[in-house]
Image (cartoon, rainbow, N blue to C red):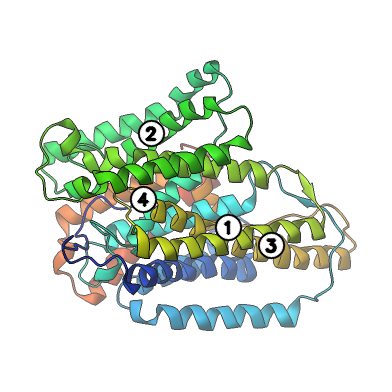
Amino acid sequence: MEAEMGDSITHDLSEVDLKSWRSIKESLDSFLVIIPTVLGFILSRLLCGHLPLLSTRRFLLEFLLIGLPTVILVTVGSAYGYTYSLVVSLAVVGYIYANIPPNTPIFKYEVGKRPIVFTLLRATAYSGTCAAILAVDFPSYPFDYRKSRTFGASTMDMGIGLFVVTMGLVSHRTRTTSDLKKLKRSVLPLLVLGLARTIVIAAIDYHQDETEYGKHLNAFFILGFTKLIGSFYSLLVKSDEQLLGLSLGLLFLHELALQLGLSEFVMSSAPHDGIFSANREGLSSLHGCVALYLLSIYFAKWYTSQDHLSFPDLISKLRKILLVAILCWLLTFISAYLTGIARVTFSFGYVIWIFAVCLSLVVIFAFFFELILVKSDFINKKSSGDDKERVISLPTFVESLNTNGLAHFMLSNFLTGMVNMSLDPGHRNDFESVGILSLYIFVCSGAVFILLRKSIRIA
């Protein structure tokens, strides 16, 4: 879920050349921007995995490996992001090569209904969003990272798409009309939060960019409506496998409507008057959101179709995911030339790009957390004479965010508003920007860590 404040990248539609390198380059650059967070999770697992999950020392070390690099690399150190990722990647590969034997393990992999790769993907979305929604208000935040108002694939354009995917990964297909009654526990809170945000924004006269979701809508509304509409659509299919055809069919129909004039209307300079026109950005994106949501449910059910996998079975599954990810990236590049990539309308190109990003992250997380590091755990347990079932240790950062992700996001939004109203981030120098952002990340992550220690789960 991206920030709903701050400047956006604006492109004059009369000057936008969809058949250009710009969107392709943006889509790749944006993916690489989140790699330092991924590497932070891996480093935390390698360097802090021996410490107790709930120890304060482990939390502080993980903050230095995840939180601090994130702050620096999205502000004053953005020019060195690729260098950082390359150096750390080489160091991780070198460590693995030197310490983990290449033999093939023989134990079974327990996939479970909530695979750790989904947990890591969710933590990546929350962690990156928390940093971006405040960092965007500082001058040191790169302009190219900001949301696109028309076509584009910037870093902040990924936000809402990643949240739709992570919501779909933990959702289930609606099988009967009686299942719809259960929606009030998941949809109603999102709609209430959306309404509350709209009321507060209007009450304090806080700036909101109407070209993001419209005059009255916001990300909470979009997620709530996506889950609600997606649940109704899923009644049309009789099995989880049929969700693939439903989602792709819906996505093609959505893109057809965009090409027939809807996209031009949404991105036009027409005034935001009347219910539909005032909220045309959010309303026009809903069916694209629903298509991505249903596609994510299908992928989750396919990934968890077997509770236990042998090593060859897991490798085979990851190869299939990698091939589909490559296909999605190719379709993303083609779409950039033919129809464009647009977050504001959740176009075909945008949906496929987000899915390509998520599949790529799943492959990376599975390689390290389901193969390499698990293999190390297994070898260490065998050498100590303990032949019990493997134990997967995730970073404390990840466990905290997974337990209270929504609480973390709400706190980050609240603190973002407080900083904007009291510290004037638009006029802060580089040193002040890093200091304020570091303290902000520390407070947000520290709050959910304390909740984890006290075994408190809010949302």
Question: Considering only order in the chain, which callout, 3 or 2, is on the residue closer to the N terminus?
Answer: 2
Frontmost of labels 1 and 2 is 2
Are the residues flagged by discs 2 and 4 in contact, CB closer than 8 Å? Answer: no
Question: Considering only order in the chain, which callout, 2 or 1, is on the residue closer to the N terminus?
Answer: 1
Distance in Å between CA atoms under marks 3 and 1: 37 Å
Looking at the picture, which amino acid does disc 2 mark? Gly
Question: Considering only order in the chain, which callout, 3 or 4, is on the residue closer to the N terminus?
Answer: 3
Residue beneath disc 3:
319
Residue beneath disc 1:
55
Looking at the picture, which amino acid does disc 1 mark? Ser
Q: Secondary structure at mark 2?
A: helix
Residue beneath disc 4:
347
Q: Secondary structure at mark 3?
A: helix
Residue beneath disc 2:
224
The residue depicted at 84 percent of the width and 64 percent of the height is 105
Q: Secondary structure at mark 4?
A: loop
Question: Considering only order in the chain, which callout, 4 or 2, is on the residue closer to the N terminus?
Answer: 2
The residue depicted at 27 percent of the width and 63 percent of the height is 146
Frontmost of labels 2 and 3 is 3
